[in-house]
Amino acid sequence: MNDSMMADAEWQVRWRERIFGIAAAFVRWPTNWGMGAPILLYHRVVEPGVRTTDPFTVTLDAFANQISWLNERWKLVRMQTLAERLASGNAEGLAAVTFDDGYHCTVTRALSVLRAQGVPATVFVDTGRLNTSSSALRADDVRALSDAGMEIGSHSLTHTDLTHLDDETLRLELTHSRERLSAITGVDVVGFAYPFGRYNRRVLSAVSQSGYQYACTCRQHRTNLPGDDLYKLTRTEINVGDRPRRFAAKLEGRYAPLYRAFYAIDPSRREWLWDR
């Protein structure tokens, strides 16, 4: 995993969350947001009371409250189910919870909340992280998550920017991670999440050719509608500062116009506005 890219991603999220948190109170809500299926993106869950500046975390009690809030408003399903329903043209009332990277807290903290509330989630794992530290999932943790009804998806082999790889390295990143996760769980792995949310046409084609049925991005300006490209699914990122009011604002679409504006002025993300 590229540590400098991760540090840059954390820095971007910190300032963007601060600015958007203020601006969201003044924007006009999108009228079509509620017509689509939201997908939530989590990374790490920490113990209650832990103080951290890491934007990619939520506390255990906040996570439990958020899952309860979601469970009252949507039918929460695994990503494979949601993708199938989007493809069939009927995903009304559905939403999904996802985790990226493969941290040990997914099994030690998040799983207990999900099981207690009867909610399935999808965990995207970069397999090069497995068994590498006390904060990373082990292979038997991945198996335990799968056995508990969670869907396991791939997040590549080494969590690198796939758009910078040559064709053969890209193929290995996609196929080796999928094969290892399938071997661990005994279940065919059909879902993928792009590391750092980075993709282009060549990566999209390679993901499809590697046997994945859908893929998740980090685009946050819209929800997912029937007929959308299943290899460009959008997700709403949940972070450390998302107290109840801001969490609800994100799920109500108040941040969507801000992300649209952000993508419009960023040449590397501008085409996301027209992606479906």
Image (cartoon, rainbow, N blue to C red):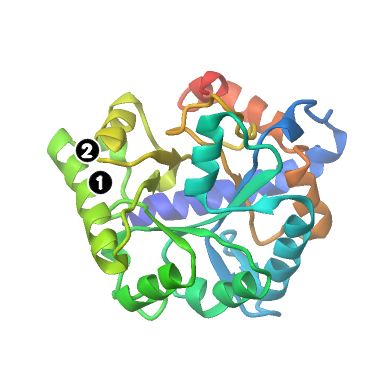
Number of residues whose C-alpha sits closer than 10 Å to that of mark 2, classed few (under 14), some (14–19) or many (20 or more): few
Mark 1 or 2, which is nearer the eye? 1
Residue at disc 2, secondary structure: loop
Please provide percent x and percent y for residue 18.
Answer: 71, 48
Q: Which residue is mark 1?
A: 174
Q: Is residue 29 left or right of residue 94?
A: right
Which residue is found at the position 65% from the left and 27% from the top?
260
Count of marks placed on residues: 2
Please provide percent x and percent y for residue 43.
Answer: 52, 61
Number of residues whose C-alpha sits closer than 10 Å to that of mark 1, classed few (under 14), some (14–19) or many (20 or more): many
Please provide percent x and percent y for residue 17.
Answer: 67, 48
Pick whichever, 166 or 81, lies toward us: 81
Upstream in the sequence, badge 1 or badge 2?
Answer: 2
**Which quadrant, please, contains the N terminus?**
bottom left
Q: Is residue 235 left or right of residue 130?
A: right
**Residue 218 seen anywhere in this rendered image of the structure:** no
- Placement of 81 over or under 86, stated as above or below: below
- Placement of 222 over or under 41, stated as above or below: above
Please provide percent x and percent y for residue 96.
Answer: 60, 50
- Placement of 64 over or under 81, stated as above or below: below
Q: Is residue 95 left or right of residue 163?
A: right
Please name the amino acid that badge 2 sits on.
Leu
Which residue is found at the position 60% from the left and 73% from the top?
115
Which residue is found at the position 57% from the left and 62% from the top?
120
Q: Quadrant of residue 143?
A: bottom left
Q: Is residue 64 left or right of residue 197?
A: right
Q: CA distance from mark 1 to mark 2?
A: 11 Å
Please name the amino acid that badge 1 sits on.
Leu
Pick whichever, 99 or 51, lies toward us: 99
Residue at disc 1, secondary structure: helix
Q: Which residue is mark 2?
A: 165
Which residue is found at the position 67% from the left and 33% from the top?
36
